[in-house]
Image: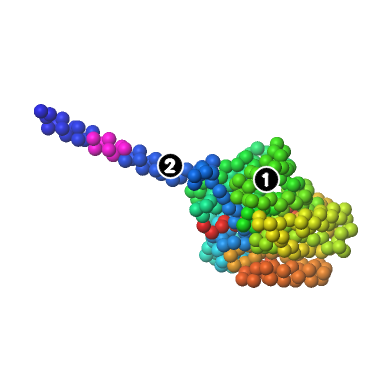
Amino acid sequence: MESSKYKIKKEQAAIALAALLVIVILLAARAYQGRVYKQPLNYGPSGVTTYVFPGEFEKQQALWLQWPEEEYSTASDPVYPVFVDIIKAVDPFERVNLIVRSQDEIARVEDLLKANGYNAQNLYYYVIDHLSIWARDVGPIFVKDHLNRLHIVDFSFNNYGRGASQYFIDTESQIHRAVAQQLNLPLAGTNLVSEGGGVESNGRGTIMLTEAVALNRNPGMTKEEIENEYKRVLGAKKVIWLKQGLAEDDLITKGHINEIARFADPHTILLAQVLPEDRYINTTSEESYLRMEENYNILLNSTDQDGKPFRIIRVPMPPTLYGELDATGKIPVRSYLNYAVTNGAVLIPTYWQPGRSEEIKAVEDQVRGIFQSLFPGRKIVSINAESVNLWGGGIHCITQHMPAS
């Protein structure tokens, strides 16, 4: 017979082994829950995950921003006032998720908001390293699977095909992955290089791209291969290819779609128009005019995923501003279509100010009327984002919507 001491030792060993197994199981479960998938999860008998890319005009749970680092805020035209205005405009209607670089930066942002007479109630911070303000392009792009669960598409980023330091590209490329990790969302893997400002969705299976951007970013792929990959990761059934964006955007993004053509709803496209009286101001305005008319003809002959034509509404570019250059002698990208939609408000750029032509004011009143008619349940908020224009973007470029799940 076993001695009592031997029995006690066996029992103690069994208890220790059981405790160890429990710890291993708990650790494994935690690791599994926190796992970020590089490849799409497989659901259904086909073993292929299908996605939907919601339209920006659909219900949202949050708007993402990336707080500007010093380079953007110490310039002669600092951009942080634009961020303050956006936070103030969106905060009453939905959550604002602000990416910052440190706890110290959180304190500085809060002090700045208070100094501007605002105590944000719906603002949340995420500490993630970043170098730019372009949340639309390097921030998380959300899609839904067939069970309405959110995924983040793992697009690659190469600084708009312009080249940059590897440190810059690596830092910007990890932002959406860090968001996925913090939110515990899976990544939908893809080999595409793409930015959010280069893709526009009607939320029902149709997306718009420009050839000038998509082909430039993926020179090793055919147009058909690019289209098929967008269809796979965004759930698109139909891809509309416009030719080029604005001429003044050539040296920046090579022609992002969000400056020229936007879905106001699943059936309505807003398309930029260089007014005839601005056409011959300079070679840039002439080129942009011709490109927009070519894109107009493409859209007139396009249909949605169900074969139905679109309602196309022309939105004028800010008149007379083609004569105003930035400090480098270039024409900034200014467009009323670089707007952002939230649950309760639509944030549109304003270009009229005292001393500028009354023609701009008249056109801006017309533009506000267009937006109010298309978004009747939302407040139209005008924001001066010209300091962001000087960096090559606008309101839409520095925001990223997160669909409701």
Q: Decide: few, some or many residues near mark 2? Use Cα within 10 Å; few <14, some 14-19, many ≥20.
A: few
Q: Are marks 1 and 2 in contact (CB under 8 Å)?
A: no
Q: Is residue 172 left or right of residue 147?
A: right
Q: Which residue is mark 1?
A: 227
Range covered by the magenta-colored residues = 14-21
Q: Which residue is mark 2?
A: 31
Direction left: furthest residue = 1
Instruction: Identify which residue, 172 or 18, lies in the foreground.
Output: 18
- Label 1 secondary element: helix
In percent of width and height, residue 164 lies at 70, 40
Magenta stretch: includes residue 377: no
In percent of width and height, residue 64 lies at 58, 56
Magenta stretch: includes residue 15: yes
Instruction: Identify which residue, 346 or 350, lies in the foreground.
Output: 346
Q: Which residue is painted at 60% across and 50% down in the image?
A: 235
User: Which quadrant holds the N terminus?
Assistant: top left
